[in-house]
Amino acid sequence: MASVHHGVVYTKKWVVNLILDVAGYVPGTGISDKVIVEPSCGCGAFLTVIAARLADDAIAVGKGWTSLGNAIRAYDIDSASVETARKAAAESLMKRGCPAIQARELCEQWIVHGDFILDDVPAADFIVGNPPYVRATEIDRGKRALYVKRLSSVTTGCDLYVSFFDRGLDALRDGGTLCFICADRWVPLLDSAGVEAAGVSEVRSHDVTMSVAAGDAPMFPDDVKERFARTDFILDMYESGVYNREEAGEKLFDHLFGKGRAVMDSEG
Ligand SMILES: C[S@@+](CC[C@H](N)C(=O)[O-])C[C@H]1O[C@@H](n2cnc3c(N)ncnc32)[C@H](O)[C@@H]1O
């Protein structure tokens, strides 16, 4: 990941694959009948993989390209990023046999130049991504006021990521999955911000991936870095195929929370 400005941090492909696996956005499971939302798509790190998985699922069940217009919705406030993301996602579709014109049309429909907090968002089965992390003082004052007005858990002092969790949980269908990258030590801040407790157990599993990416960042104290080192190891094992998804998930939960997924689940 390379950190730039105003919350722009692009996600590595293996992290994207891990998040989509954990969320259950997997071809062969009927995902072409579902709606997935990527709230801040940047240059399309998630969308290229999402488009490929969606295409694989549609091909397997014989669904035509034109039926996929509502299967994905993505946003970004940066118009240049939106254009890049559209091209990248279209490439993914074309690699799977989608004609260029249809691929372009689908991606224009899917990927919107807009503000995830303020625009209309469809009811979603999956919401995945790497939201922008921007301190309250760096958010445009006019926008900040609109976000506060729009969202129940957001105050003028909140980092922008809190708005993304709140809006995301709000757009989620019953039984849907929200999976965002978030540093684990920020998760308690969501609680104190009053973001719906019902979504927090899902949110907690997502902070795992951000921990890995941010492991060397100086903003984290040594004891936190030690935890990242172990997390790195587990994810390396997953990436290289030594651990399957379930094993890696159990080990990450055990490591980060001191108990297994089954226990977390039973706690609701
Ligand atoms: C951390 S980057 C993630 C990009 C991409 N999802 C990835 O994982 O590579 C965050 C993105 O959020 C976008 N962004 C910031 N505020 C936004 C908003 N209110 N609505 C939609 N996108 C926003 C930025 O332009 C940036 O591209």
Image (spheres, rainbow, N blue to C red):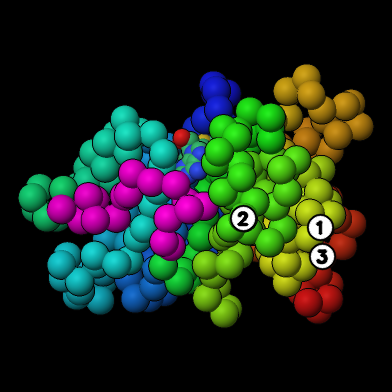
Q: Is residue 255 left or right of residue 118?
A: right
Give the label on residue 260, or none: 3
Quarter-of-image position of residue 150: bottom right
Marks 3/1: CA–CA distance: 21 Å
Q: Earlier in the sequence, mark 3 or mark 2?
A: 2
Between marks 3 and 1 in the image, the one whose residue lies nearer the viewer: 1
In the figure, 165 relative to 88: above or below? below
Can you see residue 3?
Answer: yes
Q: Earlier in the sequence, mark 3 or mark 1?
A: 1
Q: Residue at x 79, y 54 (%)?
A: 193
The yes-or-no answer for disc 3 within 8 Å of ligand 1 is no
Residue that numbered label 2 is attached to: 149
Helix, strand or loop at disc 3?
loop
Quarter-of-image position of residue 152: bottom right
Helix, strand or loop at disc 1?
helix
Between marks 2 and 1 in the image, the one whose residue lies nearer the viewer: 2
Magenta span: 105-121
Q: Position of residue 246 (x, y in %)?
A: 65, 63
Q: Residue at x 38, y 46 (%)?
A: 114
Badge 3 vs badge 1, beta-carbon distance below 8 Å:
no
Between marks 3 and 2 in the image, the one whose residue lies nearer the viewer: 2
Give the label on residue 93, or none: none
Residue type for callout 1: Asp
- Give yes or no for residue 120 being in the magenta stretch: yes
Residue type for callout 2: Lys
Residue that numbered label 1 is attached to: 191
Q: Nearer the viewer, residue 102 or 110?
A: 110
Specify few, some or many for label 3: CA neighbours under 10 Å numbering under 14, 14-19, or 20 or more.
some
